[in-house]
Image (cartoon, helix red, strand yellow):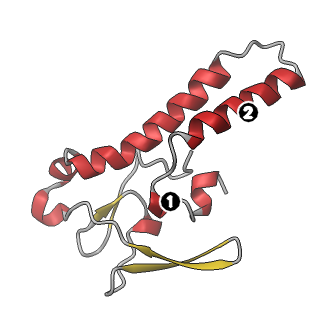
Amino acid sequence: MCELDPTKNLFIAHDGALGPCVYLNQTRGDGEIPRIFCGKDYTIKRPYFGNACEEGIAGILEKPAWREFTQVFRRRKEIYTQVFGALSSELSFADLKEAEERVERLLSRNPLPETCITCYKAYGI
């Protein structure tokens, strides 16, 4: 889960653009976000969900683009809760390994948004 949890947080830039976090809401003029991830250079397109000054926060949070983006993180949180919440307190290493493998399989079916794949925060770092 992203450390900045876009299901509970948002960021409004100085120009009014609302985004899920400060890392995806940089305000370079060309709309590109430079990023280095695992030693490689990437350029991420700044996602645009709307302008809080013009549309209001509530209006943006009801948009399909915002809902779809945050739904990915809701599903990923549900996966963790379902798998690890079902484990007993008397957990063996084999049980833990099996749970981790199950989580990995389920998360692979619910991938991060393209803009988040190369962000350390998405991996809890």
Quadrant of residue 15 within the rendered picture: bottom left
Q: Looking at the rendered structure, which numbered label has been put on residue 20? A: none
Residue assigned mark 2 = 100
Q: CA distance from mark 1 to mark 2?
A: 21 Å
Q: Position of residue 10 (x, y in %)?
A: 36, 54
Q: Position of residue 117 (x, y in %)?
A: 55, 60
Q: Residue sitting at 50 percent across and 51 percent down?
A: 112
- Asked which secondary structure carries label 2, the reply is helix
Quadrant of residue 93 within the rendered picture: top right
Q: Residue sitting at 36 percent across and 49 percent down?
A: 69
CB within 8 Å, label 1 to label 2: no
How crowded pointer 1 is (Cα within 10 Å; few <14, some 14-19, many 20+) is rated as some
Q: Position of residue 9 (x, y in %)?
A: 40, 49
Quadrant of residue 92 within the rendered picture: top right
Residue 89 placement, left or right of 48: right
Inspect the image, locate mark 2, and give the three-letter code of the amino acid beneath it. Glu
Say above or below: 20 vs 74: below
Say above or below: 103 vs 12: above
- Asked which secondary structure carries label 1, the reply is helix
Residue 92 placement, left or right of 26: right
Residue projecting furthest to the left: 54
Say above or below: 107 vs 29: above
The quarter of the picture where the N terminus appears is top right
Q: Looking at the rendered structure, which numbered label has been put on residue 116? A: 1
Q: Earlier in the sequence, mark 1 or mark 2?
A: 2
How crowded pointer 2 is (Cα within 10 Å; few <14, some 14-19, many 20+) is rated as some
Residue 22 placement, left or right of 41: left
Residue 115 placement, left or right of 94: left
Q: Residue sitting at 34 percent across and 80 percent down?
A: 31
